[in-house]
Image (cartoon, helix red, strand yellow):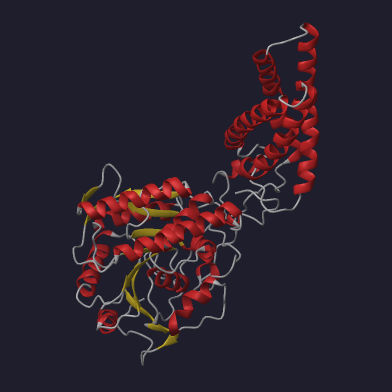
């Protein structure tokens, strides 16, 4: 998305240096609600898998959002017995709220989550997070709809899943294949600026996060997964589907109105510093050409329709002038919004005035063509008039695009500065400190990553879910309230 002024972009991605001490590189969150039976087998299985296969330090965080059974006791016991396990508790339900809250408090540079039923084969976990660690991608998702995925589930869930993704493709132009697979990961620096834009606190949280990331130009890596449906799932399909459709409408409306500042979270064109040194390189030319051609084609049809109508009431010159004037105003407005991505009312009058100048040039071309035709023959056929006008409009269209791009809607953004190496962080560096998400915070330069000293990471109680709500509003005063009598684990070697 392009606006008249862009405050900046995310820095280029870089590989996280390998380390086996200090702050965990990966924090896997398991959101749970009344999962007293499945929680312990899930955590033990996941912990064993990570111990055997994951080459970095890791953490498993249980995000208990308002369970009413013995899930909090199971979480506390697992935290006491396994050094790599931590537990959070919130007083309100909502998977999105739980993920937002835990991800906001985590100090790990890679944040992931998976469902407690472990329907997804854990062998996909390392391929999921590897592109984020290497700096290749910003987010990663497991996909059950890839051709190489192996999925076992009933026809009802299969139909709902595919229908939902078709809705996303048709309404929000989503290109990712599977929005609701409970197997995702995100870089923490991306989460810091992306999650404040995500409003949903329930099951639509995943979809909204992915749509906004994709529209901002962030790279989403998809991993084919093996997935087995959990027949005992407590998800209410009808209620969830209804909330998802409401979310689709809300996000679609926000994207159409341009109210989301997605240009704040874009990436540079390339990660090679030489790419960022190139000046005056046209950006988005291919997309603008496609948009301009579509708008131009529709405008031509609109113009011909208006000309045919006006021709019934006047001469060819009058009909041509009126039809071109009306279609030019509509064409300028459509290109302003759709082709060149200019949002808001600022500069709209000036753009229309400049568009009228371009209209004058088009009028001179088409009127001159008609004058030449009338000079050649005194009574030309209507089809001949249309053919001449189409040819003249094609020439005017090429000139219109060049004038729109270079004069009416120029890209006024400042060139991205060349990235310069930053000093190697010290152990007290705040590069990955445990802080709540801020509203558009300063972004860390990821040239080096040095683990910060381990801080107590206790089972924490959040009042009435206000943690997630205040985090979404950029409230920097969020303070977890400890509920355990002790704040350290003597068996935790970190």
- Which quarter of the picture shows residue 326? top right
- Name of the residue lying farthest toward the front: 313
Residue closest to the eye, 284 or 50: 284
- Name of the residue lying farthest toward the bottom: 485
Residue 461 horizontal/vertical position (percent): 40, 84
Residue 436 visible in the snapshot: no
- Viewport quadrant of the C terminus: bottom left
Q: Is residue 118 left or right of residue 105?
A: left
Q: Is residue 410 left or right of residue 338?
A: right
Residue closest to the eye, 436 or 135: 436
| 91, above or below 170, in the image | below
Q: Who's the residue at 72% across and 24% down the image?
A: 311
Q: Report the label total.
A: 0
Residue 51 visible in the snapshot: yes
Residue closest to the eye, 126 or 224: 224
Residue 440 horizontal/vertical position (percent): 60, 65
Residue 131 horizontal/vertical position (percent): 40, 51
| 234, above or below 421, in the image | below
Residue 17 horizontal/vertical position (percent): 44, 58
Q: Who's the residue at 57% across and 59% down the image?
A: 445
| 292, above or below 141, in the image | above
């Amino acid at each position: 998305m392009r606006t008249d002024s862009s405050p900046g972009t995310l820095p280029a991605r870089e590989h996280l240096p390998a380390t086996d001490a200090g702050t965990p590189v990966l924090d896997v969150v398991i959101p749970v609600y009344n999962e007293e039976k499945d929680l312990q087998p899930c955590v033990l299985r996941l912990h064993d898998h990570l111990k055997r296969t994951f080459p970095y330090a890791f953490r498993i965080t249980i995000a208990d959002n308002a369970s009413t059974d013995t899930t909090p006791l199971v979480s506390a016991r697992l935290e006491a017995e396994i050094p790599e396990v931590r537990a959070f508790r919130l007083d309100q339900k909502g998977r999105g709220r739980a993920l937002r809250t835990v991800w906001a408090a985590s100090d790990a540079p890679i944040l992931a989550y998976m469902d407690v039923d472990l329907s997804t084969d854990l062998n996909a976990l390392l391929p999921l997070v590897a592109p984020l660690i290497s700096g290749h991608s910003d987010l990663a998702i497991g996909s059950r709809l890839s051709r190489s995925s192996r999925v076992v589930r009933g026809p009802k869930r299969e139909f709902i899943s595919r229908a939902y993704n078709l809705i996303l493709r048709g309404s929000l132009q989503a290109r990712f294949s599977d929005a609701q697979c409970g197997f995702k990961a995100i870089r923490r620096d991306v989460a810091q600026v992306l999650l404040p834009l995500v409003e949903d606190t329930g099951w639509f949280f995943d979809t909204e996060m992915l749509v906004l990331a994709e529209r901002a130009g962030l790279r989403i890596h998809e991993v084919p997964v093996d997935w087995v449906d959990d027949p005992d799932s407590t998800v209410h399909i009808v209620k969830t589907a209804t909330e998802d459709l409401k979310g689709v409408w809300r996000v679609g409306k926000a994207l159409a109105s341009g109210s989301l500042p997605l240009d704040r979270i874009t990436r540079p064109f390339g990660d090679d510093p030489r790419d960022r040194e190139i000046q005056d390189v046209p950006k988005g030319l291919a997309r603008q050409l496609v948009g301009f051609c579509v708008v131009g084609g529709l405008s031509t049809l609109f113009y011909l329709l208006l000309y045919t109508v006006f021709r019934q009431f006047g001469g060819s010159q009058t009909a041509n002038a009126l039809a071109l004037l009306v279609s030019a105003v509509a064409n300028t407005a459509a290109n302003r919004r759709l082709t060149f991505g200019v949002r808001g009312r600022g500069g709209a009058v000036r753009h229309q005035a400049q568009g009228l100048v371009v209209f004058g040039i088009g009028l001179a071309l088409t009127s001159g063509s008609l004058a030449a035709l009338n000079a050649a023959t005194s009574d030309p056929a209507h089809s001949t008039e249309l053919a001449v006008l189409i040819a003249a409009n094609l020439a005017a269209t090429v000139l219109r695009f060049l004038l729109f791009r270079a004069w009416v809607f120029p890209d006024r953004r400042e060139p991205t500065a060349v990235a310069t190496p930053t000093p190697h962080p010290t152990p007290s560096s705040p590069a990955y400190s445990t802080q709540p998400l801020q509203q558009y915070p300063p972004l860390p330069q990821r040239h080096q990553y040095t683990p910060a000293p381990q801080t107590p990471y206790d089972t924490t109680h959040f009042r009435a879910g206000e943690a997630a709500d205040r985090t979404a509003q950029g409230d920097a005063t969020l303070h977890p309230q400890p509920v355990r009598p002790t704040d350290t684990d003597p068996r935790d070697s970190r």
